[in-house]
């Protein structure tokens, strides 16, 4: 849905084209981030569920286990917990990377087109002000 300027010289056409291109890029980044977060979240939920099931099974069997077996079970659970912690750190790292990428893109856009950025910010502020004023 990208618009282009057909040499009309009209400034609003250029703004429309830039806004459309920027919106498309932002939407693509958002969809990529959302998909990645959903995949990582599903993996983390799966690992957490597995850890919970293992812990429940251990609690059921604990009275009948020897000290060596309990120690081995403890080691296995700690290994799984460490794996989950690593996955959670990976998720946080990915979220941080995508946030930084979005901030860099926004900063570059504002530096490249300060007047258009100001107009968008003013329009957004006006629109939000009108919406909140009604409430």
Image (cartoon, rainbow, N blue to C red):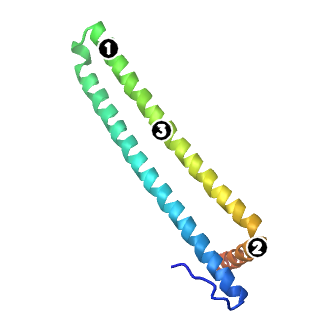
Q: How far apart are marks 3 and 2 (CA)?
A: 38 Å
| Residue 118, numbered circle | 2
Q: Residue 44 sits in which quadrant?
A: top left
- Location of residue 67 in the rendering, given as x and y in whole percent from the top left corner: 30, 7
Q: How far apart are marks 2 and 1 (CA)?
A: 62 Å
The local secondary structure at tag 2 comes to: helix
- Location of residue 45 in the rendering, given as x and y in whole percent from the top left corner: 37, 43
In the foreground, 125 or 130: 125
Q: How far apart are marks 1 and 3 (CA)?
A: 24 Å
In the foreground, 15 or 89: 15
Which is in the foreground here, disc 2 or disc 1? 2
In the foreground, 104 or 37: 104
Q: Which of marks 1 and 3 is nearer the N terminus?
A: 1
Q: Which of marks 2 and 1 is nearer the N terminus?
A: 1
Residue ID at (53%, 45%)? 94
Above-or-below relation of 113 to 62: below
- Location of residue 104 in the rendering, given as x and y in whole percent from the top left corner: 67, 56
Q: Are marks 3 and 2 in contact (CB under 8 Å)?
A: no
Q: Mark 1 points at which residue?
A: 72
Residue ID at (55%, 42%)? 93
Residue ID at (60%, 82%)? 4
Q: How many labels does the image show?
A: 3
The local secondary structure at tag 3 comes to: helix
In the foreground, 80 or 61: 80
Q: Name the residue under label 3.
A: 88
Which residue extends farthest bottom? 8
- Location of residue 2 in the rendering, given as x and y in whole percent from the top left corner: 54, 78
């Amino acid at each position: 849905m990208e618009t282009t300027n057909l040499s009309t010289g009209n400034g609003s056409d250029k703004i429309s084209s830039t806004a459309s291109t920027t919106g498309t890029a932002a939407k693509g980044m958002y969809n990529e981030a959302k998909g990645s977060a959903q995949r990582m979240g599903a993996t983390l939920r799966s690992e957490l569920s597995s850890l919970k099931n293992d812990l429940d099974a251990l609690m059921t069997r604990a009275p009948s286990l020897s000290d060596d077996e309990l120690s081995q079970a403890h080691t296995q659970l700690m290994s799984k917990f460490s794996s989950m912690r690593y996955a959670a750190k990976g998720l946080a790292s990915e979220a941080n990377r995508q946030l930084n990428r979005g901030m860099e893109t926004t900063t570059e856009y504002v530096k490249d087109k300060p007047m258009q950025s100001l107009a968008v910010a003013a329009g957004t502020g006006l629109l939000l002000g009108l919406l909140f004023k009604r409430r």
